[in-house]
Image (cartoon, helix red, strand yellow):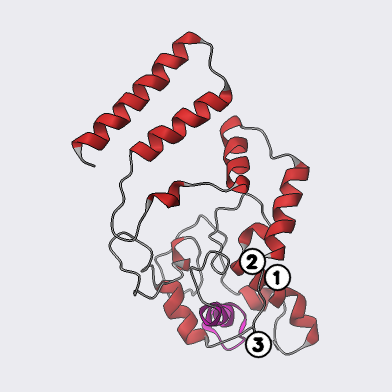
Amino acid sequence: MNKLIFASSMIAVAAVLAGCGTGTRSAADYDKMTAEVIKASFVERGIAKLDRLEQDEARKACWQSEVSGKPLDPKVEKAIEEAALKTVKWPSDGKFLGDWKQGETIAQSGRGLTWSDDDKVVNGGNCYNCHQIDKKEISYGTLGPSLWNYGKIRGVTNPDDPAAKPIIEYTWAKIWNSRAFNACTKMPSAGHKGILTEQQIKHIMALLLDPKSPVNQ
């Protein structure tokens, strides 16, 4: 952060603190000032632009719920999830599973979309950052649930069996736009936000659901 940006941040912080003493500011005023402090603390660098700080209405609602400590209004929650589900694009060729080996490579990769990458870098899924997946990988995050034996636990012994269709479609939709099932999820919407391509998502699907994948052994 350069000195000018740092100084701007400090001025914004001072304004917030000064406002706290007046007792005349509303919650909306504080939200606005907080956003200004955050925005002043970031600079554009490489492909990372300031538009990344912009929140859509769903994210604003979730953020306000988190800050206030109050649960999201059920009607708002349902509306967010229904809207997210409508954005899901199903496989163009009707095939949900790709190559689990490529899926493992994508899950391991955290490259792409950072300030040090350029727009030609192929994005990874960075799945291990939040999930345990293959037991052979000992470095993984715990923000999300373990996905070890994901397909096996859910009875997907034959992906072509019609009985497997509901969990396969759920998994695809969850990866495409995670808000479809959890309005305030922290999981990235890999398809909806253009983080991963359709083919990459197919490979991740295979990693999770293919009975031959080491995840399901």
Residue at x 46% of width, y 15% of height: 20
- Magenta run includes residue 167: no
Mark 3 falls on what kind of element? loop
Ranked by sequence position, the earlier of labels 3 and 1 is: 3
Disc 1 target residue: 170
Relative vertical location of residue 215 with respect to residue 182 in this rendering, above or below: below
Mark 3 → mark 1, Cα distance in angstroms: 14 Å
The location of residue 44, given as percent across then percent down, is: 31, 51
Q: Earlier in the sequence, mark 3 or mark 2?
A: 3
Q: Residue at x 40, y 18 (%)?
A: 17
Q: What residue type is labelled 1?
A: Tyr
Marks 2 and 1 in Cβ contact (< 8 Å):
yes
Q: What residue type is labelled 3?
A: Lys
In the image, which residues are magenta?
Answer: 198-217
- Residue 167 position (above or below residue 139): below
**Residue 16 on image: x %, y %:** 42, 21
Residue 204 among those drawn in magenta: yes
Give the left or right position of residue 141, taking residue 87 as reference.
left
In the rendered image, which quarter contains the N terminus?
Answer: top left
The quadrant of the image that shows the C terminus is: bottom right
Q: How many labels does the image show?
A: 3
Q: What residue type is labelled 2?
A: Lys
Residue density around tag 3, few if under 14, some if 14–19, many if 20 or more, within 10 Å = few
